[in-house]
């Protein structure tokens, strides 16, 4: 019966606390076995590398975007940075994301590129704020593994979380495509773009005071109770648990992502600020940071609306 359980676990992505002897393997094999036995190390390396690569890709894109647009916060600094040579596929990807003109690409290819861009933004700005949730899962998993109980790898939880942001990225990319199409539609683009930015800031500011925002924030701040009460040794249930955590995070942060439409979608400085604020907001217990940000966004929206009109 024990062998059957272990066989089922191997096919479902579940690990047990049983310590096998890998002394017969070579050095590389023993290293891989050690990684498999310590999932926390694996998830830290993969998540950390993913966040780093996302920021590097977005930074390279932002440098090229600063050369193309007018004046945005940080553009002067970005123009002073060297443009490192990149593979042709990355240059093509950046061009698809940054240019409002249709180029020679189909709408489908542009949609895929913009979807990937928004997903990179979510990984860079939102995944760090999920670190407490991932760490909490690993701590519970370590306790279960010591008892010899089967445990689903933390990467399954992360995959569910990122799946939500991938779906959200599709919506944000659709909005971006709409703005790109509007950019080429007429001479009223600049004032109407300012009004659209003011509306985005207004929505983001009002949402900071909403009950839904507070409810989602409470879930994000207390991952232990959610993870512990819904603990499972089945991969599909852990994936769904990651999806649930992703939905709570999206409920906290979707309106803040709208700010990017007001400051420039590829404004890396504002992206970093939003990511930092999200991390702080989820780590604090009071409502002051949330409501202070909401008040600032509302004042900003009013000022931008007056200027645009």
Image: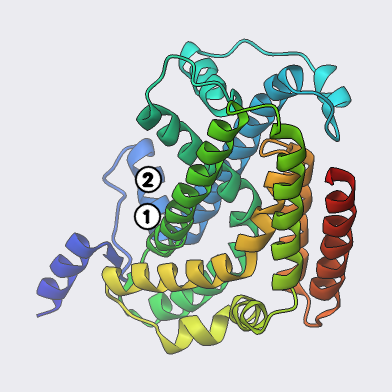
Compared with residue 213, is residue 53 higher up or lower down, i.e. above or below?
Answer: above
Give the percent coordinates (x, y) of residue 107. Answer: 39, 29
Q: Which mark is residue 32?
A: 2
Crowding around mark 2 (Cα neighbors within 10 Å: few <14, some 14 to 19, many 20+) is few
**Which structural element holds mark 1?**
helix
Give the percent coordinates (x, y) of residue 263. Answer: 76, 42
Q: Distance between the residues labelled 1 and 2?
A: 6 Å
Which color scheme does this rendered protein use?
rainbow
All told, the count of numbered labels is: 2
Compared with residue 138, is residue 231 higher up or lower down, i.e. above or below?
Answer: below
**Which residue is depicted at the point 50% across and 43% down?**
173
Q: Name the residue under label 1.
A: 36
- Is residue 17 something one can see in this rendering? no
Judged left or right of residue 147, residue 274 is right
Crowding around mark 1 (Cα neighbors within 10 Å: few <14, some 14 to 19, many 20+) is some
Compared with residue 298, is residue 167 higher up or lower down, i.e. above or below?
Answer: above
Quadrant (top left/top right/bottom left/bottom right) for the N terminus: bottom left
**Residues under numbered marks 1 and 2 in contact, where contact means CB atoms less than 8 Å apart:** yes
Viewer-closest of 182 and 274: 182
Give the percent coordinates (x, y) of residue 3. Answer: 12, 72
**Which structural element holds mark 2?**
helix
- Is residue 37 something one can see in this rendering? yes
Viewer-closest of 302 and 65: 302
Q: Residue 169 carries which label?
A: none
Residue 105 is drawn in which quadrant? top left
Viewer-closest of 130 and 48: 130
**Which residue is depicted at the point 57% across and 79% down?**
223
**Which residue is depicted at the point 89% across and 51% down?**
306
Give the percent coordinates (x, y) of residue 238. Answer: 36, 72
**Which residue is depicted at the point 84% across and 72% down?**
289
């Amino acid at each position: 019966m024990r062998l059957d359980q272990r066989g089922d676990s191997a096919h479902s992505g579940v690990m047990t606390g049983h310590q096998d002897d890998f002394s017969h393997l070579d050095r590389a094999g023993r290293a891989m076995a050690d990684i498999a036995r310590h999932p926390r190390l694996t998830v830290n390396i993969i998540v950390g590398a993913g966040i780093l690569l996302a920021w590097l890709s977005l930074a390279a894109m932002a440098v090229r975007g600063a050369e193309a647009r007018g004046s945005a916060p940080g553009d002067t600094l970005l123009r002073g940075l060297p443009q490192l040579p990149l593979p042709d596929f990355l240059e093509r990807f950046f061009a698809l994301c940054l240019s409002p003109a249709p180029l020679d690409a189909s709408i489908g290819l542009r949609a895929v590129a913009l979807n990937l861009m928004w997903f990179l933004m979510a990984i860079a700005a939102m995944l760090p704020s999920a670190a407490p949730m991932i760490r909490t899962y690993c701590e519970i998993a370590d306790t279960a593994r010591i008892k010899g109980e089967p445990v689903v790898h933390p990467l399954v939880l992360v995959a569910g979380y990122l799946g939500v942001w991938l779906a959200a990225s599709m919506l944000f990319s659709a909005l971006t495509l709409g703005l790109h199409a509007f950019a080429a539609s007429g001479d009223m683009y600049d004032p109407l773009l300012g009004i659209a930015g003011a509306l985005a800031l207004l929505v983001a500011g009002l949402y900071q005071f909403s009950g839904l925002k507070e409810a989602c924030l409470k879930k994000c701040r207390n991952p232990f109770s959610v993870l512990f009460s819904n603990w499972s040794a089945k991969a599909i249930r852990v994936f769904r648990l990651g999806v649930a955590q992703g939905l709570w995070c999206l409920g906290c942060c979707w309106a803040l992502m709208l700010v990017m439409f007001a400051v420039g979608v590829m404004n890396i400085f504002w992206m970093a600020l939003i990511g930092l604020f999200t991390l702080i907001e989820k780590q604090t217990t009071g409502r002051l940071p949330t409501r202070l940000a909401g008040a600032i966004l509302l004042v900003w929206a009013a000022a931008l609306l007056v200027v645009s009109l």
